[in-house]
């Protein structure tokens, strides 16, 4: 006699993430993980071959995942609110808009965006770094 299987959420989640439920998404992810696929990264768009392969698949997948129960519950648990996915919509819209432009325009736009980004590190000279370190952590050198 067969017993009904109890649903195992961890197995269901793993199969969902591996693309068992959404097979097309897993195929797209495999394509993205291969070296031949590109995204909107400016350094990849500089060559003529990369310009032809500007892909919005990454942004579509991010938007798709944003509406999934997994992501929404994660956001609700962490922040106390559901995600409206507006940032993902904006990224997809920007990517699709870029695909309608000429390759020279795309390169200029992406270079401008890259230059406008602030770097994650604050660069300091040796003297500036020493002064900053003393200001932040100087009291650690004092003997108690």
Image (cartoon, rainbow, N blue to C red):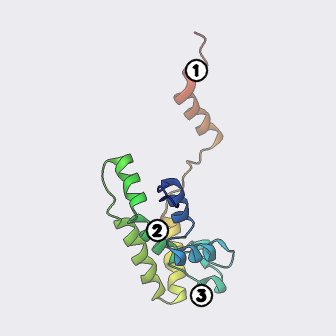
Query: For residue 140, which numbered disc appears in the image?
Result: 1
How far is the residue under mark 3 from the one under mark 1? Answer: 55 Å
Mark 1 is surrounded, within 10 Å at the Cα level, by few (under 14), some (14 to 19) or many (20 or more) other residues, namely few
Near-viewer residue (106 or 76):
76
Q: Position of residue 23 (x, y in %)?
A: 54, 76
Query: For residue 45, which numbered disc appears in the image?
Result: none
Tag 3 secondary structure: helix
**Residue carrying label 2:** 62
**In the shown orientation, is residue 32 left or right of residue 82?**
right
* Badge nearest the viewer, 2 or 3: 2
Query: For residue 52, which numbered disc appears in the image?
Result: 3
In which quadrant of the rendered view does residue 88 lie?
bottom left
Tag 1 secondary structure: helix
Q: Which residue of the protein is positioned furthest toward the front in this rendering?
A: 1
Earlier residue among tags 2 and 3: 3
* Badge nearest the viewer, 3 or 1: 3
Earlier residue among tags 1 and 2: 2
């Amino acid at each position: 006699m067969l017993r009904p299987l109890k649903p195992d959420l961890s197995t269901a989640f793993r199969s969902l993430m591996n693309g068992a439920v959404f097979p097309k998404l897993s195929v797209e992810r495999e394509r993205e993980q291969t070296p031949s696929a590109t995204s909107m990264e400016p350094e990849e768009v500089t060559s003529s071959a990369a310009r032809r392969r500007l892909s919005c698949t990454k942004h579509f997948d991010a938007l798709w995942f944003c509406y999934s129960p997994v992501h929404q519950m994660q956001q609700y648990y962490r922040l106390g609110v559901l995600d409206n996915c507006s940032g993902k919509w904006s990224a997809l819209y920007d990517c699709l808009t870029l695909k309608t432009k000429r390759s020279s325009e795309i390169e200029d736009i992406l270079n401008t965006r890259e230059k406008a980004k602030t770097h994650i590190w604050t660069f300091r000279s040796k003297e500036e770094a020493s002064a900053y370190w003393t200001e932040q952590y100087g009291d650690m050198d004092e003997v108690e």
